[in-house]
Structures are given as C-alpha cells and as structure tokens.
Image (cartoon, rainbow, N blue to C red):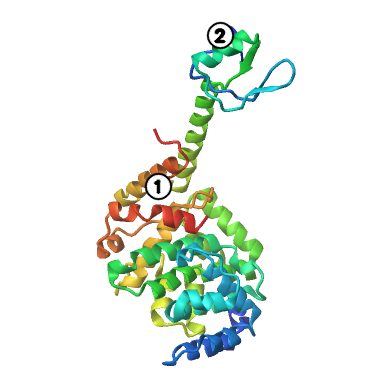
C-alpha cells in the first residue's frame, strides 16, 4: 500500500525496500518507521513508501484462522456429543492455532 | 474382495530370515554389533527401513544416521530389537524397499511417538509399545497394495459421509484393516501383545482389555487429531473407558502434542 510521505506514521512497516531517485537503497523491507526516519525521508524529498497494509494482514490472518477452524471441525465432525472427543477437538484446535501463530 | 485380500496375505513373503538371524544374535549375552551389521547389510530393504526408523524423530537421535553401523551403535541393542522387527515388517510389506509401503509413514511415526510417551501409564516397555504404534496400521498398507483403486473409493466414502473408515471397509471389502493386520501379524509370529494392539486398536473395550491396546488406541486417535496435514480423514472415536483405564488427563497428554505433531510432520 503506497502512502505519501506526508501521511506516513511512526510504527508503520515498509512492505518493500525504499530507494531514492538514483536507485540507492535508503531502507530495507521490514523497517519499522519512526518519527526521525519519516522526517529524514521528507528532507530527502522521498515521495512516499510502500507500507504493510495492516487491515489486509488482519483480513488474511482472519481467513487463515477460519480455514483452520473449519478444517479441524470437518475432521472431528462425527465426534458428536462425546465429552472427551469434544475436549480433544478443542485442544487440537488450540494447538494448531498456537503453532500457526493464530491464537489471540 | 475379501478373497483377494486373503490371496494377498497368502502370497506375502515371509519376514526376512536375516532379520530373524539378527534378532537371534541380539538375544545372545555377548552381542557383537559388528555381527549384526554384517547380517543387516546383506538385506538392503531391511537396512534402508532400519535407517528410516533410526532417523525418525521418535528415536530422538540428534544427528543424522547414515550407516547401518551408526544406527546399531546409536539405537543400542534393546531398541535395535524393536526397530529391526519394525523394519522387517515394513520391508516385507513394501515388496522391494521402495516407498510404496511407507505411504502411511507419517501417521505411523506419530502414533509410535504418542505410544512411547504414554507407555509408562500402563508400566509398559516403551520400545515394544512404540513398535506396536508403528505397526498398528499394517493392514491398511496391505489392503492399499492389493486393492488400490477399491480402497481409494472406500476411503473417499468414509471421508464424504463422515463415517469411521472401519465401517466403510467392512461394507465394501467384507473385512477391515485391523482384522487384516491381525492376520498378517499372527502369520508372521509377532509377539501376542503386538498382534492384540494391531487387531484391536479401534476397539479396545473388549471382554479382556489390555494395556498395550489401550495405549495404541489412544495414541492412534491423538496422531490423527494432531495431523495438521490431513485435510479430510475423520478422527476416530476415542474410548473414554480406555482413557480412564490409563488414568490419563488432558493436562498431561497436552504436553506431548508438539512431539506427536512433529513426529508425523
């Protein structure tokens, strides 16, 4: 997501490396912007930067989570009302979410 | 179909006589590893399966094992007995040391890992219990080999209709993988506890429940439940009675989740 220099905010993360007009690398992808860096970019008249779209990331994360929940439900779909199977279903899902970094 | 499976069982080659020789050497008081290595190296199928087993996570070896000699040294005589048994069975089912018989390897390794972790709950030998976990589905390997297309249809139906695989197998084939596995294991004169675990891993609550059957039953369900790569196969039902007989609680079992999941990865 391209953001003009004047609208960049501290805490935003560069989605791609940032080059100056001469093609020289100013900042690497993944750099977390702070106020001083943004001021420096303004002084060097950098038009703006590609930053990570946080809303899109959240949407992707949500979709992955839903996919994982649905897949686990499908695999436990005949568990019925047996309490132990329900517990195992819950525990397995919690494990999958945690190991995928999708737990809240 | 059941006749065809019976025919396949009848045609199974015997377990490598070299494996029997190795097991005999291992039972002598002054075991010489060099003698075992010499015997093992005469059977490439057996040796390759032994290396696969030695390098699997549930044996917990930190570094890669690339020779039969290393495998023998690292595993030690006790574990070696179990792993040679398992390697001989898998090699015989494999029909030539290729990967065909190892299709279900991931699940077997995860079940073995879980079985090893739970063995102490029933004061069982961890190596014997892990071997039972590793071999519990040998019936599936054999049915998959002799009725490949029909077995795919059976598995598809079980997934589509969310019914236990055993039910779909009995409907279509007139038998199931536990019964087939039991027949094979008895034919190969496996120890009675291994035969029992293979025969009853889906039905541990018979007239005379056995601890090793309970452990392999629970291990099998856990391995299915924690297989993140399995998209469709339903997780078999867990016997509450077997769980209770082993005195398990989820807090303890949960601690083993990462190992079980990574053993099957």
- Labels 1 and 2: the sequence-earlier one: 2
- Helix or strand or loop: what does disc 1 sit on? helix
The total of numbered circles placed on residues is: 2
As helix, strand or loop, the secondary structure at mark 2 comes to helix
The percent position of residue B86, horizontal first and vertical second, equals 51, 75
C-alpha distance separating marks 1 and 2: 43 Å
Question: Relative to B207, is B104 above or below?
Answer: above
Which chain is indicated by disc 2?
A
Instruction: Tell me where residue B241 appears, x and y as whole percent.
Output: 28, 62
Residue at the spot of label 2: A7
Q: For mark 2, does the 10 Å Cα neighbourhood hold few (<14), some (14 to 19), or many (20 or more) residues?
A: few
A34, above or below B147, in the image: above
Q: Which residue carries the number 1 mark?
A: A92
Above/below status of A18 relative to B265: above
The quadrant in which the C terminus of chain A is found is top left
Taking B94 as reference, is B72 left or right? left
**B69 or B133: nearer the eye?**
B69
Q: Residue furthest right?
A: A22
Observer-nearest of B192 and B22: B22
Against B45, is B23 above or below?
below
Q: Is residue B176 visible?
A: no
Give the side of residue B72 with respect to residue B4, left or right. Answer: left
């Amino acid at each position: 997501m391209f953001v003009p220099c004047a609208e960049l905010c501290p805490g935003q993360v560069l989605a791609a490396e940032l080059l100056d007009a001469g093609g020289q690398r100013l900042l690497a992808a993944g750099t977390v912007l702070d106020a001083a860096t943004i001021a420096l970019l303004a002084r060097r008249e950098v038009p703006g930067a590609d930053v990570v779209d946080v809303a899109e990331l959240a949407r992707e994360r949500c979709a992955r989570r839903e996919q994982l929940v649905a897949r686990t439900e499908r695999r436990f779909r005949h568990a019925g009302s047996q309490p132990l199977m329900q517990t195992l279903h819950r525990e397995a899902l919690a494990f999958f979410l945690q190991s995928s970094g999708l737990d809240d | 179909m059941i006749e065809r499976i019976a025919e396949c069982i009848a045609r199974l080659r015997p377990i490598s006589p070299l494996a029997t020789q190795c097991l005999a050497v291992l039972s002598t008081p002054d075991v010489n590893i060099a003698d075992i290595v010499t015997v093992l190296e005469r059977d490439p199928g057996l040796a390759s399966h032994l290396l696969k087993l030695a390098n699997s996570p549930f044996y917990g070896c930190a570094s890669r094992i690339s020779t039969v000699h290393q495998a023998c040294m690292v595993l030690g005589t006790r574990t070696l007995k179990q792993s040679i048994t398992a390697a001989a069975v898998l090699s015989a089912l494999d029909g030539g040391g290729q990967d065909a018989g190892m299709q279900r390897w991931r699940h077997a390794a995860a079940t073995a890992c879980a079985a090893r972790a739970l063995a102490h709950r029933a004061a069982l030998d961890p190596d014997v219990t892990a071997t039972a976990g590793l071999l519990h589905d040998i019936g599936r390997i054999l049915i998959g080999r002799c009725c490949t297309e029909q077995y795919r249809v059976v598995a598809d139906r079980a997934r589509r209709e969310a019914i236990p695989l055993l039910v779909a197998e009995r409907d279509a084939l007139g038998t199931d993988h536990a019964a087939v596995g039991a027949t094979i294991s008895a034919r190969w004169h496996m120890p009675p506890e291994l035969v029992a675990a293979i025969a009853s891993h889906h039905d541990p609550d018979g007239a005379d429940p056995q601890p090793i059957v309970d452990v392999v039953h629970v291990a099998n369900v856990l391995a299915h439940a924690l297989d993140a790569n399995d998209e469709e196969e339903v997780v078999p039902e867990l016997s509450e009675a077997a769980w209770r007989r082993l005195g398990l609680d989820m807090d303890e079992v949960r601690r083993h989740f990462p190992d079980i999941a990574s053993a099957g990865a």
